[in-house]
Amino acid sequence: MRIGVDVGGTNTDAVLMDGRRVVATYKSPTTADVGSGIVAAIRAVLDASGLGPESIKAVMIGTTHFTNAFVERKRLLPVGIIRIALPAGKGLPPLMDWPEDLKAGVGGDVALVGGGREFDGRPIAPLDEAAVAEAARRFRAKGLTAVAISSIFAPVSPDMEERAAAIVREQHPDALITLSGSIGRIGMLERENATIMNASLAEMARHVVASFHAALAELKLDCPFFVSQNDGTLMNAETVARFPVLTFASGPTNSMRGAAYLSGLTDALVIDIGGTTSDVGMLVKGFPRESSVAVDIGGVRTNFRMPDILSIGLGGGSHVRPEQGPVDGSGEVSVRVGPDSVGYRLPQEARVFGGEVLTTSDIAVAAGLARMGDPSRVAGLDRRLVTAAQAEIRRLLSGAIDRMKTSATDLPVVLVGGGAILVDGTLPGAARIVRPENGGVANAIGAAIAQIGGEVDRVYSYQELGREAAIAKAKEEAAAIAIRAGAAPGSIDIRDLEEVPLAYLPGGAVRIRAKAVGDMAGI
């Protein structure tokens, strides 16, 4: 028995599963106090199933806490930044491409020090330990508790970052340190950005994890809990406290994993229609296709793993506004749908619930696609308006499908999320529409069934190791990371392997990225 919870901007969903069977589900508007909403969601599925807390072996939570905090510039710590890169890496200083308001809030102090390594691990220069110690003392004097340390090619050889962290702890014992080699991929500037972002969330991460522990204690759930990360796998509480940025975009990822499970499809397009947005992504071997380019989060470029997701402003709470139409009742009506939405206030503001805002949910009720609220409140809508709104919804979704496809071939499309009721019939670009049972809580199901993952992204020398040995080494390292994170050794599977020859580097250099996943040990 396990419980999956996903906290979205509009709804909080929960599901209780017995192995692979769905036992109970729950959906309710997200509360301003997210913690109490999680408690209410878990209590609801326990009550619906008639089970006691002792039956639950694990709880999996998908949360938007950290994404929202960064995007909204709330509860972020100023960061002491150490870049180990001199003399090679001083041309483009840290934070140079950040939005000014974010730079002002997060950029506590910057220190550029000597050190760094080549792609093959050879040192560019020795680590300037005295400069690191001086920076740590300065950070402490300024009251900066969050510290981000980045070094050139740290994913290949993290020793300089680790030594710098040890020096910082000697001078500043209270420092909350983030090392870039533990988060980002090869690519110094984007990896450094992700490291600074993570450090700015360090204090909030500790509070959020503590609140999750408190919520489970309140429910008398004596079991481990895990938090979904953005590659479709899980991490334990300790890892979340250290790496909150890895939860970014975990909501759409959970939905896609849940869609794969419910539909039985491993290669398809998934459209998750929530209350505010529709997230469109591609399933490849049952996992979301990862973005191959730097991802912009809150105006900052990063290169840690992120799903390739397209979000459009269409959801069950989206505003529907007639733009033009003849007064005499003849001719066509033009409408605009979204991108603004009533969000979690749908039960108060939509017309069918007694409100004054015309939403896409009202259109779905008027068109006979759904029953909710008081249908008589939309019975008098102009049929041309309803038809035009439905056409605009199809146009928005079909455009998103075309943008996500990599070929002209039509693909199966899995519709999930509470807003899936908005779609009538087929969509251009879709070979067929699949509406799985329990699709409205696919995000919570995706959290509940998720596995533990590990990834390695490094440059290897085929000339030195040989291709087979290098690939085997990358697989072993990825598997070891997954096992350390809590995966059962006998369940490890390599789900993704990518080789990129680096022709501009000597020695047969090839960048290998390997991703391993496995079932949770002991559950």
Image (cartoon, rainbow, N blue to C red):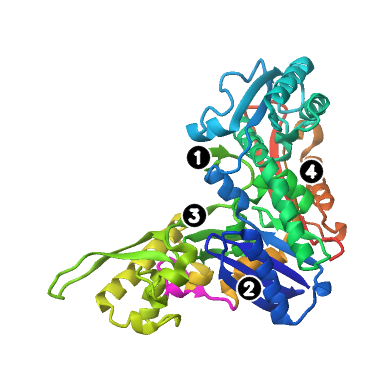
Residue picked out by circle 4 = 468
* Element class at badge 3: strand
Give the foreground label among 2 and 1.
1
Question: Tag 2 or tag 4, which sits nearer the N-term?
Answer: 2
Choose mark 3 or mark 4, whichever is in front: 3
Magenta stretch: includes residue 127: no
Question: From the viewer's perspective, is 424 left or right of 163?
Answer: left
Which of the two marks, 3 or 1, is nearer to us in this view? 1
Circle 1 sits on which residue?
Answer: 299
Label 4's element?
helix
Q: Residue at x 55, y 40 (%)?
A: 294
**Alpha carbon distance from label 2 to label 1:** 35 Å
Where residue 105 appears, as percent x and y from the top left, is 56, 33
How far apart, in angstroms, are the residues tagged by discs 4 and 1?
Answer: 40 Å
Q: Please state which amino acid type lies under the numbered disc 4.
A: Glu
Dot placed on the residue nearer the N-terminal end, 2 or 1: 2
Screen quadrant of the C terminus? bottom right
Badge 1 element:
loop
State the separation of the CA atoms marked 4 and 2: 37 Å
Is residue 326 shown above or below 50?
above
Label number found at residue 310: 3
Distance between mark 3 and mark 1 Cα atoms:
16 Å
Residue 130 visible in the picture = yes
The label shown at residue 262 is 2
